[in-house]
């Protein structure tokens, strides 16, 4: 396996390089790596160390991303490579996202697409770790995937540069942008080691300008990241910038990594967050990680008819017309793509 030269960097004096992939914009000395630990400068050339090295591959229902308004019922081949540009203390994939050895199994783009075809997937999802920092791997896979009619989706923290957005946009169909703690800048500094949240909002605008389907999540963490004022602010920004029909998923925290003593978020707190986002004007708000909760379902914003009933990742009842309208009042529901009734409701791992 030869080294793979990185995209999106510039050569500087003294064999230094500047990486333009994520908003950290690291200046990297010769023989050093960037903050993400998976991009290395060797003699003034930046290399992607995680190209083609998957730390995980699985067939997932698309609802796991979560994407609730994009090809419902579809199944996707999910892949991930080592590394991350965040240091979230609550990361539930920390064993691979914070892996300093850049481990992984050689699983090149053509093999990913082949595996997806063999398992009757409809798309590829770049997920679990941060796809921005394995852009070269995602980019080549996405190009091949498009050629055989697959869609591509990113599950991302959104900390990408405008250059990165423009690079992947021609091949990207949908993106889930994961916020934490209501997007509070102090929360991001303290618990994710992220200096500035503004680039995330700029990336969202860039994705929208490129016509990419967007769904947003926000992880609600007890006490340190459950402020209803922040959720109100975030919901208002989404409504005013992306539209009130943008799906907004409030995700329940569960103890993990360096935050095992923080309890899971109470259902009561999740419901308060849900009502806050609804009252701010968003039409499609969901509660995630509380299986069986009524807020997993889609309701008509016009007449409140139950349109899509879910249990965890599974669609248990479909009550929309063929052209995605409410069967009672004919209100148009914003769903991109079509219903895939044969998709597997449960994830299973290849490795
Ligand atoms: S992807 Fe981000 S963290 Fe990694 S080297 Fe580039 S700018 Fe730094």
Image (tube, grey):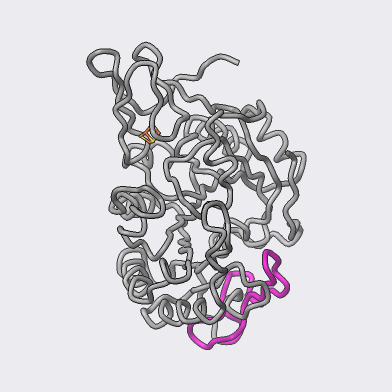
In which quadrant of this rendering is ligand 1 seen? Answer: top left
Q: Where is residue 160 in the image (x, y as percent from the top left)?
A: 37, 43
For the point 33% across and 62% down, the residue is: 184
> In which quadrant will I find the C terminus?
top right
Q: Work out which residue is located at the far front of the displayed protein and give it.
A: 261
Which of 170/198 is in front? 198
In this picture, residue 194 sits left or right of residue 36: left
Q: Quadrant of residue 299?
A: bottom right
Does the magenta segment cover residue 317?
Answer: yes
Q: Position of residue 194 (x, y in %)?
A: 35, 48
In this picture, residue 295 sits left or right of residue 163: right
Vertical placement of 274 versus 221: above or below?
A: below
Vertical placement of 44 versus 34: above or below?
A: above
* Number of callouts: 0
Give the magenta-colored segment's residue range: 299-328
For the point 50% across and 19% down, the residue is: 4
Which of 30/315 is in front? 30
């Amino acid at each position: 396996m030869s080294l793979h030269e990185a995209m999106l960097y510039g050569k500087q004096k003294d064999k230094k390089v500047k990486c333009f992939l994520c908003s950290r914009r690291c200046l990297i000395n010769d023989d050093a790596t960037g903050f993400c630990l998976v991009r290395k400068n060797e003699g003034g050339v930046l290399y992607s160390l995680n190209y083609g090295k998957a730390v995980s591959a699985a067939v997932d229902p698309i609802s796991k991303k979560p994407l609730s308004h994009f090809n419902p019922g579809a199944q996707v081949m999910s892949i991930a490579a080592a590394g991350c540009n965040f240091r979230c203390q609550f990361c539930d994939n920390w064993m691979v996202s914070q892996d300093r050895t850049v481990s992984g199994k050689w699983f090149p783009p053509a093999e990913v697409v082949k595996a997806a075809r063999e398992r009757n997937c409809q798309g590829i999802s770049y997920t679990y770790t941060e796809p921005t920092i394995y852009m070269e791997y995602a980019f080549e896979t996405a190009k091949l995937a498009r050629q055989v009619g697959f869609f591509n989706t990113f599950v991302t923290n959104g900390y990408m540069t405008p250059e990165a957005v423009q690079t992947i946009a021609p091949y990207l169909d949908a993106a889930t942008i994961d916020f934490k703690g209501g997007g509070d800048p102090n929360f991001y500094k303290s618990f994710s080691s992220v200096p500035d949240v503004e680039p995330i909002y700029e990336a969202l605008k860039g994705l929208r300008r490129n016509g990419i389907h967007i769904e947003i999540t926000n992880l609600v963490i007890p006490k340190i990241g459950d402020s209803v004022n922040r959720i109100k602010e975030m919901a208002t920004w989404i409504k005013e910038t992306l539209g009130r029909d943008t799906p907004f998923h409030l995700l329940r925290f569960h103890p993990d990594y360096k935050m095992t003593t923080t309890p899971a978020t109470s259902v009561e707190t999740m419901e308060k967050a849900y009502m806050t986002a609804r009252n701010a004007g968003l039409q499609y708000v969901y509660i995630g990680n509380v299986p069986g909760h009524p807020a997993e379902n889609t309701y008509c914003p016009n007449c409140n008819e139950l349109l899509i009933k879910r249990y965890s990742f599974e669609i248990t009842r479909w009550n929309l017309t063929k052209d995605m309208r409410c069967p009672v009042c004919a209100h148009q529901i914003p769903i991109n793509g079509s219903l895939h009734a044969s998709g597997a409701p449960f994830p299973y791992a290849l490795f």
